[in-house]
Every structure is written in C-alpha cells, then in structure tokens.
Image (cartoon, helix red, strand yellow):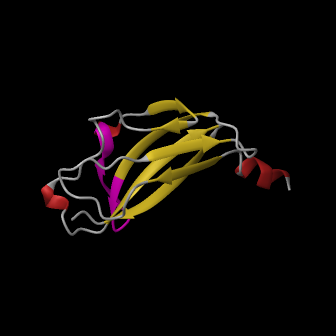
Amino acid sequence: MLELALAAAFKATLSAPTHRPRVNHAWPITIRAADLGGRPIRARVTMRLLYNGIAVGKVDNGRVYTFTGAWREKKGQEIEYPPASRGQRLTFQALVTARGKTIKLNYWVQPR
C-alpha cells in the first residue's frame, strides 16, 4: 500500500484544443500539476515529439520549464508544427517531474 502512495505522488494533465493542429499555426497547450488533493504544486516540464515511439524532436530545444500549478507557452511563442510534419502521426510527449517522480503525458497529433 505504501508503494502505491509513493508511486502516485502527484497528478499531471495536458489539455490541447485539437489532435489535428494546422502547420505554421499556434497550437496552445496547458499542462497542470497538482497533489492528490487537487492543490497546485511546483513541477518541471520538458517536451518532445515521438514518431513510432522514437524521439524525433525536442520542443523549445529541450528546454526545461519550472512552474507551479499550470504552464502555458507565452502568447506568440506557442508550439507550431512545420510543413514537413503534415499528415504524419506523431506523439507529443510532456515529461512532468515533481516530488521525485516523472509522469509522461502522451497526446497523439497529426498536423494538417
């Protein structure tokens, strides 16, 4: 029982407007981190893109962001998919770390 409590030290969520973002257009996402009671906590996030489970790109050159509660790209600096990604089935992955644990948030995308 103790191991289960330690494994679930916090919860993280990712929300995005669509699984089919338009290339060269802003794709705003929100990542949240909270304790098991729903209270915002301090966490770190880095993001990458996977193709068939293999990392093929880093968002913001692999930068690690620290936040409390919720994180969003700054207005005008949102994620944009390049034309070469059009039609490709990718996995957007956010690695959220807090309290010594990391949660992988996977979200499939297919830019159009």
* Identity of the residue drawn at 34% across and 39% down: 62
Q: What secondary structure characterizes most of the magenta part? A: strand
Residue 92 forms part of the magenta stretch? no
Q: Is residue 29 above or below residue 92?
A: above
Name the image quarter holding residue 9. top right
* Identity of the residue drawn at 49% across and 52% down: 14
Residue 54: % across, % down:
34, 61
Name the image quarter holding residue 97. top right
Q: Is residue 97 above or below residue 87?
A: above
Residue 22: % across, % down:
22, 58
* Identity of the residue drawn at 64% across and 38% down: 100
**Where the N terminus falls, by quadrant?**
bottom right
Q: Nearer the viewer, residue 39 or 91?
A: 39
Magenta-colored span: 49-60
Residue 40: % across, % down:
64, 36
Residue 89: % across, % down:
29, 69
Spot the residue most to the left: 83
Name the side, left or right, on which 79 lies relative to 94: left
Number of marks in the image?
Answer: 0
Spot the residue most to the right: 1
**Where the C terminus falls, by quadrant?**
bottom left
